[in-house]
Image (cartoon, rainbow, N blue to C red):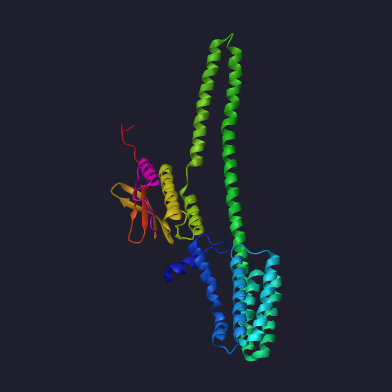
């Protein structure tokens, strides 16, 4: 992984959620591993310090245990945190091991208290962390007085500041988790509201028509023996009402299924961000004069392109543009979706692109898709104005 890819992965790694792929895992490990710089002093002390063999072995085992517990606490807190009781037990373990190692092996091990402070700030509730972090700093200073008071004073402020900074990071993680849950709830509520809207529309459309059909059927049944002509008129009315009801239902369902470009653009931002892809998406588009069929074709094109980016491309960045262009065929609305991924493994156009081409052709538009120098690009064009009626001149 290059330096640029690593920076991009760290920027796009979701906060407060377990890593979903190898790239996110490496980014989170790197983010946590950077802060292991304070272990340089204990490691150097083990290598070059004047310790007995047994002390060196014990110190190495203690350091490995400390780092393992610390990484488990912090890494799990960024995705699936331990239970409160487990967190307290592990923090007590770190709080005992750090002073034991620093007291027995010397001032080079005082940096372990920085990690103890970080673990307290990242995993404990805010009120508990406000007490635990100063307690960790005080314990570090008390141990440091025994070996090197000057170094202990130098680490005292650092231990406090980093610990309290991690309280903010922990709050950020918890807030992000809550926001993600709230967004999922809002999406579910929106879907339920749309189902209710369709149910209301169908009820309003069919309630009156079916009631009228039932009434006229009863009338036709009563008139049939004595007044067959009037019964035939009632049956004709029933046919007319049922045909109109069928037309109304088709229009309602067509409107329900037809995607809207503004909604697809908003969904694109959410989908790409959730997949860890840096997204550049335009604001709400100006669709003045654009036929509904053309807008729907562009919306389907955007949905298919973003689906391919998320599922197949492995891209880190995706740019969506929507512009009006004047061409020989008249004003056109052009949608382009370009990513820096591989574009999938297929050698030819898939069913999705073939279907999009057919949709766009029906709306009077065109589709272009293919590899570029840096990735893959899809361009869909539709007329920006309704097509002129050409024919008898009626």
Q: Is residue 228 above or below residue 37?
A: above
325 vs 155, left or right, is left
Specify start and end residues of the magenta stretch as a single range: 341-366
Q: For residue 109, what is the image quadrant? A: bottom right
Q: Residue at x 43, y 49 (%)?
A: 304
Q: Is residue 258 above or below residue 210?
A: below
> Dividing the image into 4 quarters, which one contains the N terminus?
bottom left
300 vs 222, left or right, is left
The one nearer the camera, 15 or 27, is: 27
The one nearer the camera, 377 or 231, is: 377
Q: Residue at x 58, y 55 (%)?
A: 183
The one nearer the camera, 8 or 301, is: 8
306 vs 132, left or right, is left
The one nearer the camera, 341 or 224, is: 341
Q: For residue 294, what is the image quadrant? A: top left
Q: Is residue 394 magenta?
A: no
Q: Is residue 175 visible?
A: yes
Q: Position of residue 103 (x, y in %)?
A: 67, 85
Q: Position of residue 89 (x, y in %)?
A: 70, 70
> Dividing the image into 4 quarters, which one contains the C terminus?
top left
């Amino acid at each position: 992984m290059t330096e640029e890819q690593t920076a991009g992965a760290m920027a796009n790694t979701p906060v407060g959620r377990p890593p979903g792929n190898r790239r996110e895992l490496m980014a989170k490990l790197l983010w946590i591993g950077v802060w292991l710089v304070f272990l340089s002093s204990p490691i150097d002390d083990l290598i070059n310090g004047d310790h007995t063999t047994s002390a060196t072995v014990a110190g190495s085992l203690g350091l490995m245990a400390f780092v393992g517990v610390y990484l488990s606490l912090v890494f799990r807190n960024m995705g699936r945190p331990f239970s409160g009781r487990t967190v307290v037990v592990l923090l007590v373990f770190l709080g005992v091991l750090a002073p034991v190692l620093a007291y027995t092996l010397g001032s080079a091990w005082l940096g372990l208290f920085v990690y103890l402070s970080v673990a307290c700030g990242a995993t404990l509730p805010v009120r508990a962390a406000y007490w635990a972090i100063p307690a960790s700093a005080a314990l570090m200073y008390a141990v440091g007085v025994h070996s090197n008071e000057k170094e202990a004073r130098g680490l005292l402020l650092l231990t406090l500041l980093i610990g309290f900074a991690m309280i903010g990071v922990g709050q950020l993680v918890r807030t992000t988790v809550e926001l993600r849950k709230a967004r999922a709830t809002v999406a579910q509520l929106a879907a339920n509201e749309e189902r209710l809207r369709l149910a209301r529309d169908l009820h309003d459309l069919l309630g009156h028509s079916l009631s009228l059909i039932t009434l006229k059927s009863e009338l036709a049944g009563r008139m049939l023996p004595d007044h067959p002509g009037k019964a035939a008129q009632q049956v004709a009315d029933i046919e007319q009402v049922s045909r109109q009801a069928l037309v109304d239902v088709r229009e309602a369902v067509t409107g329900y299924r037809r995607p809207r470009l503004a909604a697809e653009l908003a969904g694109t931002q959410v989908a790409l961000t959730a997949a860890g892809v840096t997204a550049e998406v335009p604001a709400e588009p100006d669709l003045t004069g654009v036929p509904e069929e053309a807008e729907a074709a562009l919306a389907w094109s955007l949905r298919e392109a973003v689906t391919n980016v998320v599922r197949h491309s492995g891209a880190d960045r995706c740019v969506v543009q929507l512009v009006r262009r004047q061409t020989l065929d008249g004003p056109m609305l052009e949608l382009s979706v370009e990513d820096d991924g591989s574009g999938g493994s297929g050698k030819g156009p898939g069913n999705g692109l073939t279907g999009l081409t057919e949709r766009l052709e029906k709306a009077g538009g065109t589709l272009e898709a293919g590899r570029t120098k840096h990735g893959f690009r899809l361009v869909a064009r539709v007329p920006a104005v309704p097509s002129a009626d050409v024919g008898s001149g009626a």
